[in-house]
């Protein structure tokens, strides 16, 4: 299997003049190993003046400039522009899923992502030993690690001991796959390979996310499950989604419960009318 080439990108940090290279954060995803990109930017505490309340700014030592990595810059950037996770609407996913059946293994991978909420690396890191109980697909299983295009198998993002769950719709699809050896990966794809296929499939179908004006991301499959479990389901749905998605902080899971503008208005009208 050939390695998929990572396209060159431009860093969104306006203070960064370096090309996007491995180790850089241009899309919230580390694509490899490399040096941190450090840049001098205007100090936010003193607004570049070097003074704060008549004294030298503690952050920039009076120079008005501080050093910041692109990684740190992106943490602030994405906090500003990030929208509540919505996922892929069921009717849109049905259309994508129908077209994906022409690619059985990739179709199974996509359905498994939608029905488990696993991150891409977690899903691609699953082996047959992980998900099989005899000849039957486990509906709950331990995740040993995740797949990374550069490093191969590596430890989990949230540490060891995470459990994965397959919702019922994934089981018959996975059962049709040809089983490999116990240590073989169930989905032997590169991360960029499965992502590119998913995007190209949507381009062929003319599908776009109305909020971003671009194709849905693979990660939106995870958001789809989270939104269904949390939206309008109360505390029970929140706790269930947190367990399935592997969130250690409930505030992360609460992001899935945010309403759209139309839904806010509908709920306000119901409350005003005493419903």
Image (tube, rainbow, N blue to C red):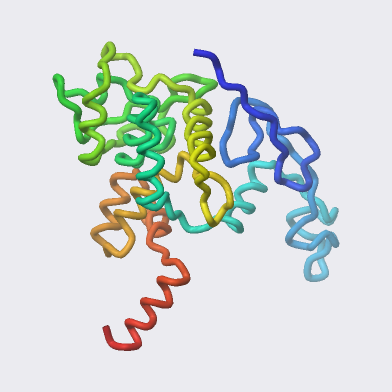
Q: Residue at x 51, y 20 (%)?
A: 151
Look at the picture and state if 149 lies above or below 140. above
Q: Position of residue 61 (x, y in %)?
A: 80, 53
Q: Nearer the viewer, residue 63 or 95?
A: 95
Q: Position of residue 170 (x, y in %)?
A: 26, 35
Q: Residue at x 71, y 40 (%)?
A: 11
Q: Is residue 153 left or right of residue 215?
A: left
Q: Nearer the viewer, residue 212 or 240?
A: 212
Q: Is residue 213 left or right of residue 171?
A: right
Q: Position of residue 242 (x, y in %)?
A: 32, 50
Quarter of the image for residue 17 reads top right
Look at the picture and state if 50 lies above or below 192. below
Q: Residue at x 15, y 20 (%)?
A: 135
Q: Residue at x 38, y 54 (%)?
A: 253
Q: Residue furthest bottom?
A: 273
Q: Is residue 236 left or right of residue 68?
A: left
Q: Is residue 2 left or right of residue 186?
A: right
Quarter of the rendering occupied by the C terminus: bottom left
Count of residue discs? 0
Q: Nearer the viewer, residue 126 or 105?
A: 105
Q: Position of residue 209 (x, y in %)?
A: 51, 51
């Amino acid at each position: 299997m050939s390695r998929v080439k990572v396209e060159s990108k431009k860093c969104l940090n306006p203070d960064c003049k370096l090309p996007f290279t491995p180790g850089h954060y241009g899309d919230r995803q580390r694509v490899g190993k490399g040096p941190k990109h450090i840049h001098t930017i205007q100090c936010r505490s003193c607004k570049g003046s070097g003074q704060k309340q008549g004294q030298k700014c503690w952050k920039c030592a009076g120079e008005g400039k501080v050093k910041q990595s692109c990684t740190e810059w992106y943490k602030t950037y994405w906090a500003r522009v990030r929208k509540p996770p919505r996922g892929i609407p069921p009717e849109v996913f049905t259309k994508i899923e129908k077209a994906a059946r022409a690619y059985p293994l990739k179709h199974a991978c996509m359905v498994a992502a939608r029905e488990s909420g696993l991150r891409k690396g977690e899903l691609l890191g699953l082996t047959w030993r992980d998900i099989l109980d005899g000849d039957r697909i486990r509906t709950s299983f331990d995740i040993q690690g995740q797949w990374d295009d550069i490093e191969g198998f590596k430890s989990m993002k949230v540490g060891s001991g995470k459990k994965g769950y397959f919702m019922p719709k994934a089981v018959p699809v996975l059962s049709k796959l040809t089983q490999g050896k116990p240590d073989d990966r169930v989905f032997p794809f590169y991360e960029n390979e499965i992502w590119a296929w998913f995007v190209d499939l949507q381009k062929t179908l003319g599908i776009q996310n109305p909020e971003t004006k671009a194709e849905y991301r693979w990660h939106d499959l995870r958001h789809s499950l989270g939104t269904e479990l949390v939206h309008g389901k109360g505390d029970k749905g929140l706790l269930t989604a947190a367990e399935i998605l592997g969130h250690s902080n409930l505030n992360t899971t609460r992001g899935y419960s945010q309403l759209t503008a139309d839904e806010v208005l509908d709920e306000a009208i119901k409350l005003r009318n005493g419903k």
